[in-house]
Amino acid sequence: MDYKIVWSPEAIEDLRSIAEYIQRDSEFYARAVVTKILDVSRSIKSFPLIGRVVPEFGNENIRERFIYSYRLVYQIKKQRILIVAVIHERRLFETVTERFEK
């Protein structure tokens, strides 16, 4: 069963910021990174449990996939997957925890 993929406004902003940052050095690599992130986000709709459980939460429904040095964090809900964040692996995760409280 395929789930519906939904991006939170914060995750969309994360993706825009990543693209803008990389684009300072290379438009080609910015496009490549964003394309890869979008491809991975689409692939989880068929296999949502493929991502690892986010260690900061320990919740089976909050998972992540790694793309280059970025973490694509998502939450599995009934028939949809909510993309919550796309953050650099070195960024503090506390800023993302607030996004689940909404």
Image: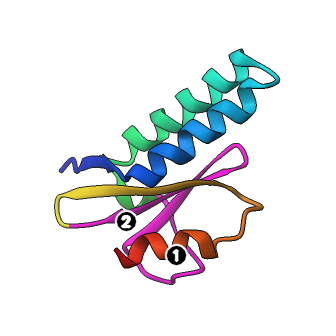
Q: Residue at x 55, y 69 (%)?
A: 96
Which percent across, then down, holds residue 49? 39, 62
Q: Secondary structure at mark 1?
A: helix
Q: Mark 1 to mark 2: distance in Å? A: 12 Å
Q: Position of residue 12 (x, y in %)?
A: 45, 44
- Mark 1: few, some, or many residues within 10 Å (few <14, many ≥20)? some
Mark 1 or mark 2, which is nearer to you? 1
Rendered image quadrant of residue 93: bottom right
**Which of these two is toward me, 74 or 19?**
19
**Residue 75, numbered circle:** 2
Instruction: Say what amino acid the circle numbered 1 marks.
Output: Thr
* 10 Å crowding of disc 2: few (<14), some (14-19), many (20+): many
Q: Quadrant of residue 25?
A: top right
Q: How is the image coloured?
A: rainbow
Q: Which residue is mark 1?
A: 97
- Residue furthest to the bottom in view is 58
Q: Earlier in the sequence, mark 1 or mark 2?
A: 2
Please identify the residue farthest to the right as the structure is shown: 25
Q: Is residue 79 above or below residue 67?
A: below
- Please tell me the numbered disc located at residue 54: none
Magenta range: 51-77
User: Could you tell me residue 16's position as x and y percent?
Assistant: 55, 37
- The residue at 38%/79% (across/down) is 101
Q: Is there CB contact under 8 Å for labels 1 and 2?
A: no
Which residue appears at 59% of the width and 78% of the height? 55
Taking 19 as reference, is 45 above or below it?
below
Nearer the observer, 12 or 40: 12
